């Protein structure tokens, strides 16, 4: 963990060296000044947006002078000057201005290809397993990738990946039941497994009712740019970053988000937070770990489940509670047959 820290220390100040200048007052405070380049850096990856090719060459020279005393230099194979109409890849995204003058940020072709290869590899490895094993292996990958790319123009990509996943699962099921007709295979593994969506072609496990999430179930939420040179390490901006973290909605389905908002994110039985509000992950692999370590603990180990609570003033009996709280409530009310509790359902992520 010390290497990224030292790298950030060594590369601190590259924005000033590139000539980036921000407005410091007025309603546009924090925005780049007219004619100023705009620099974006993550660790040792950096892109500088300039107004002309001459300005881009000047910025490259200034940054090279800044890095030389520190024993650093640009990677010539990865450093290039391109027009925005050609587009470029950065952190798994493709940034390009199209002929209609629209600037669109999409998942890069290389990132989509890597994901397809990984999904195909996972399904090939699990040919000897059952449907639950396939779902358990694919869900973190799908959910993590969709959560990372939900802030850009990803709707068409998500739809294409859902179609690719349907073909992979069909191929897996056909290989597993080679002697059975396709109609039998479709009836066994495909159906309306997600009761909250009108989709009858969802791959799932008939015995448990579990199913993998689809990419398109993740809603698109636009990223809000950080103001000026605001840094999460600046103690004076702690309130600003805390407010940004609160505004970041976890990639859950809309129904669950409405319930969380109505409950202020707390369990109505115990008063504790249902989900933690830590710093959001930054890459698909981090989203996968967040799913496995944080979300599953909150939903499975800490037992987050849907729970019907009778007598709500708005007529809607559905609430989100920890299932441990629900089991305690069931035990306390076991001698009161007048109160009928709905069976708990696991929280579905999308």
Image (spheres, rainbow, N blue to C red):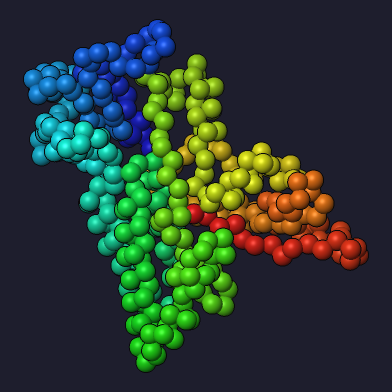
- The residue lying furthest to the front in this view is 100
Residue at (24%, 57%) from the top-left corner?
A: 113
- The residue lying furthest to the bottom in this view is 179
Q: Is 156 placed above or below 4 here?
A: below
Q: Quadrant of residue 12?
A: top left
- The residue lying furthest to the top in this view is 25
Viewer-closest of 22 and 342: 342
- Residue 125 image position (x, y, % from top left): 34, 73
- Residue 308 image position (x, y, % from top left): 74, 57
Q: Do we see residue 325 in this rendering? A: no
Q: Is 78 placed above or below 177 here?
A: above
- Residue 67 image position (x, y, % from top left): 18, 23
Q: Is residue 80 left or right of residue 318?
A: left
Viewer-closest of 283 and 7: 283
Residue at (82%, 51%) from the top-left corner?
A: 311
Quadrant location, the N terminus: top left
Viewer-closest of 273 and 200: 200
Residue at (50%, 37%) from the top-left corner?
A: 248
Q: Is 303 placed above or below 233 here?
A: below
Q: Is residue 321 left or right of residue 129?
A: right
Residue at (49%, 47%) from the top-left corner?
A: 251
């Amino acid at each position: 963990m010390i290497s990224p820290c030292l790298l950030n220390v060594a590369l601190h100040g590259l924005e000033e060296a590139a000539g980036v200048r921000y407005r410091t007052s007025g309603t546009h405070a924090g925005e780049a000044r007219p004619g100023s380049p705009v620099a974006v850096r993550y660790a040792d990856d950096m892109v500088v947006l300039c107004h002309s090719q001459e300005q881009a060459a000047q910025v490259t020279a200034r940054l090279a002078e800044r890095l030389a005393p520190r024993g650093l230099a640009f990677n010539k194979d990865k450093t290039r000057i391109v027009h925005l109409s050609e587009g470029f890849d950065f952190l798994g995204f493709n940034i390009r201005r199209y002929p209609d003058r629209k600037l669109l940020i999409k998942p890069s072709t290389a990132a989509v290809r890597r994901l397809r290869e990984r999904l195909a590899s996972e399904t090939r490895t699990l040919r000897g397993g059952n449907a639950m094993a396939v779902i358990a292996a694919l869900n973190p990958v799908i959910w993590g990738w969709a959560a990372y790319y939900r802030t850009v123009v990803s709707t068409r990509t998500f739809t294409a990946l859902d179609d690719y996943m349907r073909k992979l699962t069909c191929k897996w099921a056909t290989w597993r039941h080679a002697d059975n007709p396709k109609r039998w295979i479709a009836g066994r593994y495909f159906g309306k497994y997600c009761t909250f969506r009108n989709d009858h072609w969802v791959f799932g496990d008939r015995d448990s009712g579990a199913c993998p999430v689809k990419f398109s179930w993740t809603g698109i939420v636009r990223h809000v740019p950080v103001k000026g040179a605001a840094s999460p390490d600046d103690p004076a901006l702690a309130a600003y970053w805390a407010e940004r973290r609160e505004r970041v909605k976890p990639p859950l389905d809309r129904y669950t988000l409405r319930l969380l908002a109505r409950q202020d994110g707390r369990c109505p039985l115990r008063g504790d937070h249902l989900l933690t509000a830590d710093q959001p992950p930054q890459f698909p692999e981090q989203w996968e770990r967040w799913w496995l370590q944080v979300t599953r603990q909150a939903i499975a180990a800490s037992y987050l489940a849907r729970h019907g609570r009778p007598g709500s003033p708005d007529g809607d009996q559905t609430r989100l509670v920890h299932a441990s709280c629900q089991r305690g409530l069931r035990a306390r009310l076991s001698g009161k047959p007048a109160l009928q509790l709905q069976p708990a359902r696991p929280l579905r992520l999308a």
